[in-house]
Amino acid sequence: MAALSPPPHEEDTLPAERGRSTHAPAVPGYPTVPPGLARLNSDPADRAAAALLTCCASPAWAGRLVTHRPYPDVSALLAASDEALYDLPPVARREALTGEADRSAAPPSGYSAADTALAHAQTAYAAKFGFPFVVCLDGASAAHALNQRLTAIHTRLDHDEEAELALATEELRRLVRGRLAARAAGAARPAASLPAPGRRAPDRPYGSPEDAVCPESRDSGRPDSPYVPV
């Protein structure tokens, strides 16, 4: 069977660097995968799970993604993530959403009245639903993010618990897709950081500052990937 060629845009995932390929060895049957995804595929299970937990604070979700390795492309990884999140029982969804507490707070806007209103709304939201307000504003300008956040939280405060849990999970799914895509596209570990013979490389999560991170989260699937993007 002839080797499959990646879509044209996949070749441009990362800028070329002198003396080093921008892609890592592939899953058998596929020519190349992004370096970050290659690391996720090959790392020990505990290290891979720890890296995944930086994208979504659900051990059940991370464990499922680790179990289903290797992923032939980023599209397959994102589809697996979507499926794993949707299959979580309510208690595990709440756990994942609760893990967003440190990331869900909006930075101060400089408009004290609006910031105060948002803080009160977030407190009311957490008291009603038992998890922090989570909304995906990827791509929103800073000038509009505060208004979008305020509008969304006031609308969602009127939901019942079941409807809001479903909507909050969908917002989390979108956030996690962006985080996973950036991690999967992360550069391979630079040669300078490789350990000397006989010494173990220091642990660090994917997407550390020295990694080249690609913010693009578009799909690049192939028809025979084990997961079909939703």
Image (spheres, rainbow, N blue to C red):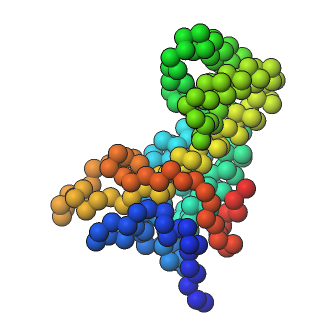
Instruction: Choose between 229 and 141: the one closer to the eye.
Output: 141
User: Residue 129's quadrant in the figure?
Assistant: top right
Q: Position of residue 137 (x, y in %)?
A: 62, 36
Residue at horizontal 60 percent and vertical 48 percent from the top: 177
User: Residue 8's quadrant in the figure?
Assistant: bottom right
Q: Is residue 175 above or below residue 27?
A: above
Q: Quadrant of the C terminus?
A: bottom right
Residue at horizontal 67 percent and vertical 63 percent from the top: 227
User: Residue 75's quadrant in the figure?
Assistant: bottom right
Q: Position of residue 228 (x, y in %)?
A: 70, 63
Residue 12 in view here: yes
Residue 116 in view here: no
Instruction: Choose between 176 and 83: the one closer to the eye.
Output: 176
Q: Position of residue 81 (x, y in %)?
A: 63, 51
Q: Quadrant of the N terminus?
A: bottom right
Instruction: Choose between 72 and 134: the one closer to the eye.
Output: 134
* Residue furthest to the front: 143
Q: Is residue 112 above or below residue 33?
A: above
Residue at horizontal 59 percent and vertical 41 percent from the top: 139
Residue at horizontal 66 percent and vertical 56 percent from the top: 79
Image mark count? 0
Q: Position of residue 140 (x, y in %)?
A: 61, 37
